[in-house]
Image (tube, helix red, strand yellow):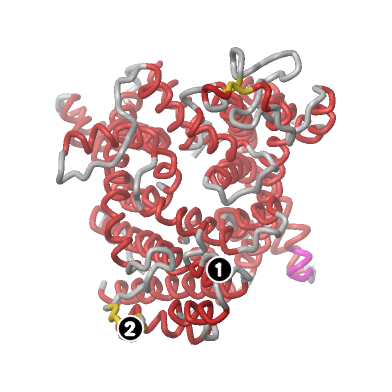
Amino acid sequence: MIGYLVRRVGGAVLVLFGLSLLLYGLFYLAPSDPAILTCGKGCTPERLAEVRHALGVDDPVATQYAHFVRGLVAGRDYPAGPATRHCPAPCLGYSFETDQPVTRLLLDRLPVSASLALGAEVLALTAGIGAGVLSGLRRYRWLDRIVNGLVLAGYAVPVFLVGLLLLLLFCVQLQWLPFPSYVPLTTDPLAWARNLLLPWVALAVIQTAAYARLTRAGIQETLAEDHIRTARAYGLPERRIIWRRALRGALLPLVTLTAIDLAAIMTSAVLTETMFGLPGVGQLLVGAVNQIDLPVVVGVTLLAGLLIVAANTVADLLYRAVDPRVELR
Amino acid sequence: MTVLRRLRGDRGFLAGSVVALLMVLVAVVAPLLAAAAGQDYTNYHDNLLDSARGGVPLGRFGGMSADHWLGVEPGTGRDLFARVVYGARVSLGVAVGATMLQVLFGVLVGTAAGLGGRWADAALTRVVDLVLAVPSLVLAISLLAIVPPDWPRPLLLAAVIAVLGWGGTARITRGETLSLRTRDYVAAARLSGAGWFRIARREIAPGLAAPVLTYAALLLPTNMIAEAGLSFLGVGVRPPTPSWGQMLSTATTWFRADPMYVAVPGGLLFLTLLAFVLVANGLRRALDPRQSEVLR
């Protein structure tokens, strides 16, 4: 168990280093110079050299990368005019564009992305399991059809298209909801939920279909097993059989899937955030990308990688916890 | 041929393939279609816009008329019909290109892992796991932003989507290869002195065709969504080259005043995606009847 964790974390660290190295390498190869952008119009060569030095892009790429890694592990000092400023570990540097520490930028934006992902996942799980159970028990044929249709459509509708249609319907035509703008949960929980409702639905549509299909398959499979027949033979009430036995077997695979999906949703929320104008990590990335703001781009990518690796590890552990037959390698 | 008979009886598949073929045709003959309409996708028509309302097309339904079959673009007045048929080129071209590259990488790596020794398999599986674990959308955005803007954009899009998305094909190919290599006919070929390359080509490849085809059919719409999404975020094809995703991104600022500008590219994108998904679903059911369920 401990050996497994050590191996897993070691592998994760390697992946993250690989990712950051790749970005640094490509960025160095690309001819775009962030110093020119930062320096702005009427830039003299002397001023440009100063900016280069302040940004730390006048060193060879290997040195730059070494500085970056040292900052991440132990923190580093940046020249800021005559003085220096200290950036404590884990230091991802300062944004070329806004001169703020990347770690702060990420932490500021994380609650928005987390709200979005968590809400969408809860919505998708509730609706998906509900529809899956009902359709698994073969009570309603029309529900079966809707679930099937949604699974197909889920592959065919990009999230931003769903978002646009939702906005058009609920904010323009019916005017039931305001145009989404982020309100922190701690300020006003009701406004938080009202504003995030449409983004949640947009993100949850595809996930719902996937969960419904999985639950249905799980329920049908479990109901065909011997222990269910035995329970029925003992005369246990049907309701109890379904809730206590069938559902448990059907929901096991969902436990691990949820952990992985949560990370996947968070990293793919870029589109939803841009679509609805929510100030999350994804929007930060899209903004940074247009300004070639390398520290921010690297920071967001590393955070996304970290989330995915962490989610996969948690999923493995959960899997092991709910199914003791599984061995961790 | 039972497969053909099954496909012929699948109404979803038939409808899907008709629409999909039509879209491919539209993409191929886009210049002819635009010429037939007497329009091109770069010409501004300021006279068709209502400057008092900030540039919304004059007339009903987004400015539809005998000259502009699907209306004009708000803000610029460019002909929407010409833009969407050229957009089909980008959408389908990038998706097909990316899918072909993914299948190529995936099958090469997957067969090598499946047929190679223990070490080769372990190393390649690691690489595949890594590709599958990478936050692909985030990385695609970063990569496309870093690459110089004057590189050929559609090619680059296809390459980036492919490089980040070949893991699934490789995993499936490896699994199938591992199961195929234990078959008697493969053992017979090995005993009669066939080399690994010959075995891969003559004995393994035919068995891979069906599972790889069904998987690739599903990759195509996924790649189309990826292209549309990246263009939506502004890192896809560069203007003035039109793309459906890019149009929908512009539509986010216009959809209140001009809903047709959402409906035309959005409807086409949805229709095309649905068509390809139906084709993929039909192929899957015909080639692998044990899994009569809808898509995985």
**Residues flagged by tags 2 and 1 on a common chain:** yes
* Mark 2 vs 1, N-terminal side: 1
For disc 1, the marked residue is A42
Residue A142 is situated, as x and y percent measured from the top left of the image, at 40, 16
Q: Nearer the viewer, residue A249 or A13?
A: A13
Vertical order, A226 against A32 (above or below): above
Residue B21 is situated, as x and y percent measured from the top left of the image, at 74, 29
Q: Chain of mark 1?
A: A
Q: Amino acid at mark 2?
A: Arg
10 Å crowding of disc 2: few (<14), some (14-19), many (20+): many
Numbered circle sitting on residue A60: none
Q: Is residue A79 left or right of residue B51?
A: left
| In the image, residue A327 lies in the stretch drawn in magenta | no
Q: Amino acid at mark 1?
A: Gly
Disc 2 versus disc 1: distance between alpha carbons?
A: 31 Å
**Which SS does the magenta portion mostly show?**
helix
Q: Nearer the viewer, residue A318 or A88?
A: A88
Picture residue at 20% right of the left edge, 28% below the top: A233
- Element assignment for label 2: strand
Q: Is residue B38 left or right of residue B163?
A: right
Picture residue at 32% right of the left edge, 69% below the top: A101
Q: Is residue A111 left or right of residue B139?
A: left
Q: Nearer the viewer, residue B281 or B135?
A: B135
Instruction: Choose top left, top right, bottom left or bottom right for residue A120.
Output: top left
| In the image, residue B195 lies in the stretch drawn in magenta | yes
Residue B195 is situated, as x and y percent measured from the top left of the image, at 77, 71
For disc 2, the marked residue is A76
Q: Is residue B122 visible?
A: no
Question: Magenta residues, as a range?
Answer: B194-199
Residue A140 is situated, as x and y percent measured from the top left of the image, at 35, 17
Marks 2 and 1: CB-CB under 8 Å?
Answer: no
Picture residue at 58% right of the left edge, 21% below the top: B50
